[in-house]
Amino acid sequence: MTFEVEFNSSHERFKVIRNLEFLIEIPSGERPLIENQVNSTYEIKGNELKWIINELSEEKSTASCEIKFSKGVDLDEIFPMLVGMKQDKTFFDFEVKRVV
């Protein structure tokens, strides 16, 4: 199973996405083989694999990771997965001028 992410934002507020994380549940008894990582790292803790992309931007526009499970793994055991990210700004780029 290969995961690929591509950055293609034309919005000024999304010039960089940092700390993009995909949390993948590892089926019981599995030890996945991680290969061909590009612009990413991973951590395995217990039955969870966290695929981490530190930065996506115009300069670092892609990331990928190949995760190999045994042939008997049902994809329903892996999906859905959780996805999270951190931004330097809010989605709507609000600025608080004053609080009354």
Image: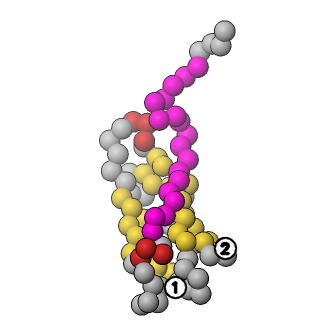
Question: Quick one: 89 or 77, which is closer to the camera?
Answer: 77
Total marks shown come to 2
Instruction: Give the x, y percent position of residue 96.
Output: 58, 19
Instruction: Tell me if residue 39 comes above or below residue 9 in the rendering.
Output: below
Residue type beneath disc 2: Lys
Earlier-in-chain disc, 1 versus 2: 1
In front of the other: 5 or 69: 69
Q: Residues within 10 Å of mark 1 (few under 14, many from 20)?
A: few
Residue 33's disc is 1
Residue 69 percent coordinates (x, y): 47, 85
Residue 27 visible within the image: yes
Which residue appears farthest toward the top when viewing the image? 100
Say which element carries label 2.
strand
Task: Report whether 57 appears left or right of 41.
Answer: left
Numbered circle sitting on residue 45: 2
What x and y, as percent, mark residue 100?
A: 66, 9
Question: Residue sitting at 46 percent across and 47 percent down?
Answer: 16
- In the depicted structure, whether residue 100 falls above or below residue 22: above
Tell me, yes or no, whether the highlighted magenta stretch contains residue 12.
no
User: What's the CA distance linking mark 1 and mark 2?
Assistant: 14 Å
Q: Would you identify the image quadrant in which residue 54 lies? A: bottom right
Magenta-colored span: 79-96
Amino acid type indicated by mark 1:
Leu
User: On screen, 89 above or below 78?
Assistant: above
Q: Residues within 10 Å of mark 2 (few under 14, many from 20)?
A: few
The percent coordinates of residue 97 (x first, y second) are 59, 15
* Tag 1 near tag 2, CB within 8 Å: no
Name the residue located 36 percent from the left edge and 59 percent from the top edge: 6
Q: Main secondary structure of the magenta part?
A: loop
Left or right relative to 41: residue 59: left
